Amino acid sequence: MQIELAQQPGVALAALMYRMIPVVFDDLYGYVYTDHAVKIDVHTTRDALVSNADDMADSVARKALESELSKWARMVPKRTDELLPWLQQQDTDVMSNPLHSA
């Protein structure tokens, strides 16, 4: 598995994002943290940041992050089983440079 991913970086990136997106968008996908052949742990800290810094919600950085999250929420498929095929169809630019994605 490791050599296949090493020889196909686009597939490796899709596999990584396939594991990350449901964690980041748990409100969209629910808590779908099943075991896979590749172990990748993903955790978000955005809720902890807001609860620990009372001015975080109004910060420029937080607003930029929320804008990015909204953009990605509109782009990704709404069903987990459609996520990996969708990722595999995307250009590497979409996955590696989300600031320039539609």
Image (tube, rainbow, N blue to C red):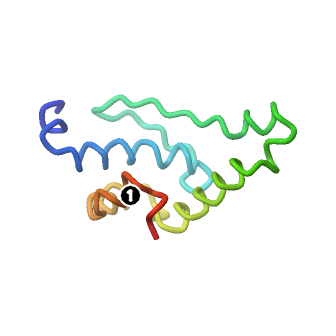
- In the displayed image of the protein, which residue is found farthest to the right? 54
41 w.r.t. 68: above or below: above
Q: Give the residue at x 12% y 40%.
A: 7
Q: In terms of image quadrants, where is residue 69?
A: bottom right
Instruction: Judge from the rendering whether residue 10 lies leftward or rightward of residue 76; answer left or right.
Output: left
| Quadrant in the picture for residue 12 | top left
Quadrant in which the N terminus is drawn: top left
- Give the residue number, with chain letter if any, for mark 1: 83
Coordinates of residue 95 in the picture (x, y in percent) = 37, 54
Residue at image position (65%, 55%) is 64
Q: Position of residue 93 (x, y in %)?
A: 33, 59
**Are there few (<14), some (14-19), or many (20+) residues within 10 Å of tag 1?**
some
Q: Is residue 49 above or below residue 89?
A: above
Residue nearest the viewer, comparing 56 with 74 = 56
Label 1 amino acid? Leu
Above or below — where is 23 with respect to 70?
above
Residue at (68% x, 40% y) in the render: 46
Is 50 placed left or right of 93 in the picture?
A: right
72 and 81: which one is in front? 72
Q: Is residue 44 above or below residue 59?
A: above
Disc 1, SS:
helix
